[in-house]
Amino acid sequence: MVRQMVPSAAYRADSLYYPDPEGMEKKTKQLESQQLALAKAEAAAKEVAQEAVKARKEARRLKKSKSNL
């Protein structure tokens, strides 16, 4: 199945590139930029989620220590 997909993907890439090489390069850079932005956003979201977990744990610890007083 993969063997059949590769020639069609190569044909599609060629058919897009040859009519407008500069446009294809621009589109490639745009897609790379979007992927980079997405990766950064996902990393930031993961960091915020980890900080939220730490904050919840600290809140539980503080509540527990308060009830032990």
Image (cartoon, rainbow, N blue to C red):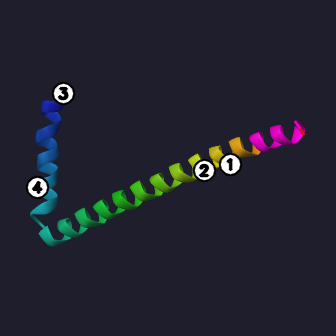
On the image, numbered disc 3 is attached to which residue?
1
Residue 68 as seen in the image, left or right of residue 12:
right
Cα separation, mark 3 vs mark 4, equals 21 Å
Cα separation, mark 1 vs mark 2, equals 6 Å
- Residue 28 image offset from top left, x and y in percent: 23, 62
Give above or below for 23 relative to 15.
below
Residue 69 as seen in the image, left or right of residue 8:
right
User: Please, what is the three-letter code of the amino acid marked with disc 3?
Assistant: Met
Give above or below for 61 relative to 45.
above
User: Please, what is the three-letter code of the amino acid marked with disc 4?
Assistant: Asp
Within 10 Å of the Cα at label 3, are there few (<14), some (14-19), or many (20+) other Cα atoms?
few
On the image, numbered disc 1 is attached to which residue?
55
Mark 3 vs 2, N-terminal side: 3
Mark 2 vs 4, N-terminal side: 4
On the image, numbered disc 2 is attached to which residue?
51
**Label 2 near label 3: C-beta < 8 Å?**
no
Q: In which quarter of the image is residue 14?
A: bottom left
Quick one: 64 or 7, which is closer to the camera? 64
Mark 3 vs 4, N-terminal side: 3
Cα separation, mark 3 vs mark 2, equals 44 Å
Within 10 Å of the Cα at label 4, are there few (<14), some (14-19), or many (20+) other Cα atoms?
few
Give above or below for 48 relative to 64.
below
- Residue 56 image offset from top left, x and y in percent: 70, 44
Within 10 Å of the Cα at label 1, are there few (<14), some (14-19), or many (20+) other Cα atoms?
few
| Mark 1, secondary structure of its residue | helix
Magenta segment main secondary structure: helix
Cα separation, mark 2 vs mark 4, equals 46 Å
On the image, numbered disc 4 is attached to which residue?
14
Q: Which residue is drawn at 18% across and 67% down?
A: 25
Q: Quadrant of residue 65?
A: top right
> Is 15 inside the magenta-drawn segment?
no
Q: Which residue is drawn at 46% across and 52% down?
A: 42
